[in-house]
Image (cartoon, grey):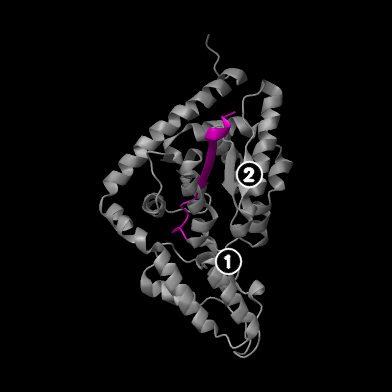
Amino acid sequence: MAQESKKRILSGIQPSGTLHIGNFFGMMKRMISFQEQGELFVFIVNLHALTSVFDGETLRRNTISAAMDFLALGLDPQRSYFWVQSDVPEHVELSWYLSNFTPVGLLQRATSYKDKVAQGLPTNAGLFTYPILQAADILLYQSDLVPVGNDQKQHVEMTRDIAIRFNNSYGEVFNLPAPDVDENVAVVPGIDGRKMSKSYGNAISIFEDRESLRQKVMSIVTDSSPVEAPKDPDTCTLFALYKLFACEDEVIAMAQCYRGGGLRYADVKKELLELIWDLFRPFRERREELEADQAKVLEILDEGAKKARVVALETIEKVREVTGVRYRP
């Protein structure tokens, strides 16, 4: 296990669409802050995206876009491992080994899979076995902490279960990771009140242009309470989003306005629009620079994959040895 002062912290983000503020608060902002706290492993999980993205050009575009977003927001490739999942083939190799230690019943209990089935979304074997590849992502780097939202906490617990089964057969090969959940931003609501998600079409992109941002913010769902009526901030999607961007004093003052009556939702939306725009303003220039020099972005990803693969090979070589897949003396 890594030293306490140098914990391995790992998380990935799926390029199934344009990254949004739910991604930012739920994962990206936290991962960037972890650069000071340990060995940071951040990657674009493009293989996972294949469960829902079936157009090659779209996946290529989204993968590069996600990398540029991360770099623009402050991820430093010199202080982290930053790569694209498919550039390290050991992810897929390890997922096959782990699949032989994963009960079908465990996969059937995955709430994320059951939720998609219940919503009538298209399902496939890749989506069903998604937790195995995710376990490979985590275990390949002997991760200590995996920052996730509440909806992904179960997958880390499943990873532990799979690792324990493997270790019971072959010895202490894998470190057992722990989920790290920030309860304050475990679920970021979309403009329709449901969890913000690319698949729901309810997301606000991180680098949304000004007019598109205005339209989305002004369309955030609210109730039909008259202006003069007191309102409950704790049940309001608009207030939940406002809390993410406003300072503590502003949040307290806004909550008082809600409860006191006389509040116009349109005024709150206008204020939220400016808060969102101002938060990401400092990063827009860097994002534009990266867009204009994508060769540099590819170079960063190539170097990141080389660094990551050195670590991955340490694990996979041990797995090949203990399983007997490495059969030559």
What number is the disc on residue 179?
2
Q: Is residue 167 left or right of residue 134?
A: right
What number is the disc on residue 172?
none
What amino acid does circle 2 point to? Pro
| Viewer-closest of 277 and 124 | 277
**In the rendered view, would you say 251 is above or below 115?**
below
- Secondary structure under the numbered disc 1 in the rendered image: loop
Residue 218 visible: no
What amino acid does circle 1 point to? Pro
Tell me where residue 8 appears, x and y as whole percent: 54, 36
Dot 2 crowding, Cα within 10 Å, few <14, some 14–19, many 20+: many
- Mark 2 or 1, nearer chain start: 2
Residue at image location 29% in from the left, 55% down from the top? 291
Tell me where residue 305 appears, x and y as whole percent: 40, 35
| Viewer-closest of 201 and 296 | 296
Residue at image location 66% in from the left, 78% down from the top? 232
Image: magenta residue range = 1-20
Q: Quadrant of residue 183?
A: bottom right
Q: Is residue 10 magenta?
A: yes
Residue 292 visible: yes
**In the rendered view, would you say 63 is above or below 170?**
below
Q: Is residue 132 magenta?
A: no
Quadrant location, the N terminus: top right
Q: Is residue 322 left or right of residue 68?
A: right
Tell me where residue 59 appears, x and y as whole percent: 42, 51
Residue at image location 35% in from the left, 35% down from the top? 303
| Viewer-closest of 10 and 230 | 230
Residue at image location 42% in from the left, 76% down from the top? 214
Look at mark 1 in the image and give the residue it sits on.
189
